[in-house]
Image (spheres, grey):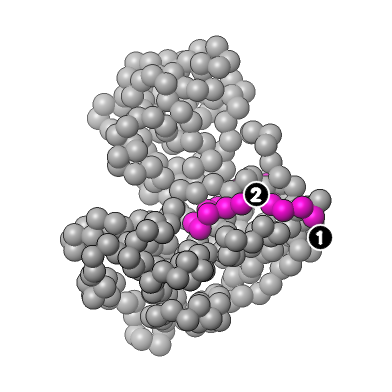
Amino acid sequence: MASNTLQVFVHTLRYEADGIISIDLRATDRQDLPAFEAGSHIDCHLPNGLVRSYSLLNDCSERHRYVLGVLKDAKSRGGSKAMHEQLRVGMRLDISAPRNNFALHEEAAHSVLVAGGIGITPLLCMAKRLRSLGKSFEVLYFARSRAHAAFIEDIEALGAKVHFHFDDAQGGPPDLKALLAARHAANTHYYACGPAVMLDAFEAHCQSLGYANAHIERFAAVEVAASSDAQQRYTVELKRSGKVIEITPELSLLAALQQAKADVMTSCEEGICGSCETRVLEGVPDHRDSVLSPAEQASNRVMMVCVSGCQSARLVLDL
C-alpha cells in the first residue's frame, strides 16, 4: 500500500435517507485539503482494515472538507457496513488524495446528469460545479421511493430542471430510453451513475441513439472475461525496483505484485476505482477494468493491475 495518505477526522455524521448517511471529513491539522474536481473520489482506510472508494459530493470549490454519501449495502463486503456502524464523530481516518475517473466536460453546451439511488453523489458535485459556472444542465434522479432518495433538498436548491422518478409512486422503473431520446441536442454530454442494470441500459440506449458523449461511473464491478489472446503464464519486470516475477494460472498479477512488495495502491480490487492504475512501459495488457475508456485501453499506456492480465509474453511496469 502506498504511504501518501492524508489524515482526517469525522466532523459530522448525518442521516440523509433510508440506509444513507453523509460523512463530513476535515483535516486533523485544520488546514485546507487538496483541491478536487467534480466527479472525484477518495479512498478511505477503514477501522476494519479495508480500503474503499467513495465519491465526493460537496462543492469542489470547498477546501475545508470532503463530504461523502454512503449507502449501507445489504451485499456489502464490509466497507459500507463499517462506514455506518464503526465511524464515530471525532474518529480519525487515513484517506487518499482525490482522484477523478469521471471527469466533467465543462465546455459542453448542456449536460444531462442521470442518477440512480446513491449514484447521485458524484453527480451532485457536478451539478454544483455547473451551477457555479453558469452552465446549462438538468438532473434525472431515480430511486425506489422518495424515502430512499438522498439530497433532494440540495438538488432542488440548485434551481435547475429536475426530473424525479420514484418507482413505488409510478408503478415501476423509468423509461430511460424515452427520457434520453427527449434530451437530444448538439454538444450535450450525458453522465450516469447508479445500479449496474441502469448503467448497462444507459450505455445501450446512448449507443442506439448515437450519443457519443456518454460517461458512466460504476460503483459495482462488471465481470470482464480474459481475451482469447490472454497469456496464462508471462513475465513481469518491475522497472524501478529491478524485480522480475513470473505469473502463473495459480497467481494473479495483483497477488504477485503484493508478494513482491511492489508499491501499488489497491482499494476495490474489482477494476472500478482506479487506485491501482499503473504505467505500462512495455508489453500488451489484457484490460478487464471498468475505468479506462476503449481509447485508453487501446493505447496500452496504463492498466489496472488488480483485475487485468497480459497478452504478451513479457510486461514491463513502472514500479
Report the Cα–Cα distance between label 2 and label 1. 20 Å
- Residue at 29% of width from left, 64% of height from top? 188
Give the foreground label among 2 and 1: 2
Report which residue position mark 1 lands on.
90
Q: Identify the image quadrant of residue 49.
A: top right
Instruction: Please state which of residues 229 and 31 is positioned toward the viewer in this rendering.
Output: 31
Secondary structure, mark 2, is loop
The answer to whether residue 306 is left or right of residue 181 is right
What's the magenta bit mostly, secondary-structure-wise? loop
Classify 182 as above or below 310.
below
Image quarter (top left, top right, bottom left or bottom right) of the C terminus: top right
Judging by the rendered image, the residue that carries numbered circle 2 is 34
Crowding at label 1, few (<14), some or many (≥20) Cα neighbours within 10 Å? some
Residue 45 within the magenta-colored segment of the rendering? yes
Residue 117 seen by the camera: no
Q: Amino acid at mark 2?
A: Pro
Looking at the rendered structure, the kind of residue marked 1 is Gly
The reply, left or right, for residue 182 in relation to residue 140 is left
Q: Quadrant of the N terminus?
A: top right
Q: Is residue 251 left or right of residue 310?
A: right
Q: Residue 50 appears at what percent x and percent y?
A: 64, 46
Residue stretch rendered in magenta on the structure: 30-48
Residue found at the far front of this picture:
134
Q: Position of residue 123 (x, y in %)?
A: 47, 65
